[in-house]
Each structure stands twice: as C-alpha cells, then as structure tokens.
Amino acid sequence: MSIRPILRYPHPLLKKICRPVERIDSEILTLIADLIDTMREGPGSVGVAASQVGVTLRLCVVDVSQSKLGKECNHGLLVLINPEVLSSEGAATMREGCMSVPDYTGDVERPTKILLRYTDEKDTLRHVTAEGFEAVAIQHEMDHLDGLLFLDRISSLKSGLFRRKSYR
Ligand code: NI
C-alpha cells in the first residue's frame, strides 16, 4: 500500500470519462488500498477517485465517518466500483473542496438523498441509500468518473468560488 500523487487541475486525465472496471484483480485491489491510503493522508479528505491518481477507471473510495459534517450519518468506508445513482431527491447547496483543486472551495447544489448501486471490493453488488454530507461526498467522487470537477458545477464563478487560505 502506498500514497499516490494527486493530479491537479487542469491535468487532462481529470477531464476523461472513465471506463468501467471489468474484473477485480490484484492490480485493482492494490489500487483500492492505495486510494484508501491516499484519502486518509489528505487533510480533511473524505474521498478520492481513481482518475485523481491517473487511473481512468470507474472506481472511488469515500469515508465521511471522521468528518464533522458526516460523522452522525454514514456507512463508514465505501469502496465504490462502477457506481450508479438509481434515484435521487431533494436539493441543497454545500461548500465543496477537492484535492485536485487545492486552492479553492466552491458552493455546489446537489440532491440530498441518493439510492446508489455499486460493486464492492469483494465483487458483491450492493445498494445503499446515502443522505446529507455522505451523499454529497459520493456524488462529488462520482463526478470525477465522468471527468467533472466541482468547478464545473458551481452556479457562478463570481459568487460561488472561494480562495482557500490553508488546506485544513
Ligand atoms: Ni474531488
């Protein structure tokens, strides 16, 4: 296991639409372990997608259980392989950050509750309903799988983007 370097905006691989994972082999399991290490190393980080370390596959990890906003309501560590949102409801605006855009945060509106289908690291198909901050974190990471950053989602570059003083 190791921490992998995070690609930063505007690296072209961050704009790629990622390919589905076809088989969970030892290479994928190593990538998953590295993504978890890389997420835990990032200060305040609650998720990372494979494309952020240069692997354009539909795979990301999320864990909001250690964060102030997510600790009340979460599923712990989620390894999301080929995730899909089956349904969503609600809408709320939250401030988002991203290890690939370290100098800024932004206000993004997203659904507040999602029903998610994904394959886990043991190759089991799972369904999970996520709410609140966890739902936001999952949707943020899933955007990376489609080559989208929060910068592509903010309503206004004038009022929705904020310069970060220091990365918490
Ligand atoms: Ni991100």
Image (tube, rainbow, N blue to C red):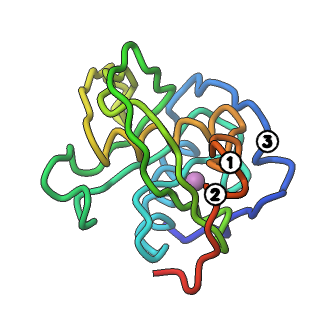
Q: Position of residue 91 (x, y in %)?
A: 38, 31
Residue at numbered disc 3? 15
Instruction: Classify mark 3 as within 8 Å of ligand 1 or not, answering yes or no.
Output: no
- Which amino acid lies under the numbered mark 2 shown in the image of this protein? Ser
Residue farthest along the bottom direction in this orientation: 166
Instruction: Farthest residue to the top: give it.
Output: 86
Nearest to the observer: residue 66 or residue 101? 101
Badge 2: few (under 14), some or many (20 or more) residues near its Cα, within 10 Å? Answer: few
Secondary structure beneath label 3: helix
Which residue is disc 1 drawn over?
156
Pointer 2 residue Cβ closer than 8 Å to ligand 1: no
Instruction: Tell me the residue at 38%/39% (across/down).
Output: 92
Badge 3 or badge 1: first in the primary sequence: 3
Q: Position of residue 72 (x, y in %)?
A: 13, 54
* Residue at position x 51%, y 26% in the image: 82
Asked whether disc 1 touches disc 2, contact meaning CB atoms under 8 Å apart, the reply is yes
Q: Is mark 1 within 8 Å of ligand 1?
A: no
Which comes sooner in the sequence, label 2 or label 3?
Answer: 3
Residue ID at (25%, 26%): 128
Q: Are marks 3 and 1 in contact (CB under 8 Å)?
A: no
- CA distance separating discs 2 and 3: 24 Å
**Residue 146, located in which quarter of the rendered image?**
top right
Which kind of residue does numbered mark 1 sit on?
Ser
Q: Residues within 10 Å of mark 3 (few under 14, many from 20)?
A: some
154 or 24, which is in the foreground?
154
**Label 1 – label 2 distance at C-alpha:** 5 Å
Please tell me how crowded label 1 is: few (under 14), some (14-19), or many (20+) other residues with Cα within 10 Å: few
Disc number placed over residue 69 in the picture, else none: none
Identify residue for label 2: 159
Q: Quadrant of the C terminus?
A: bottom left
Q: Residue at x 64, y 61 (%)?
A: 161
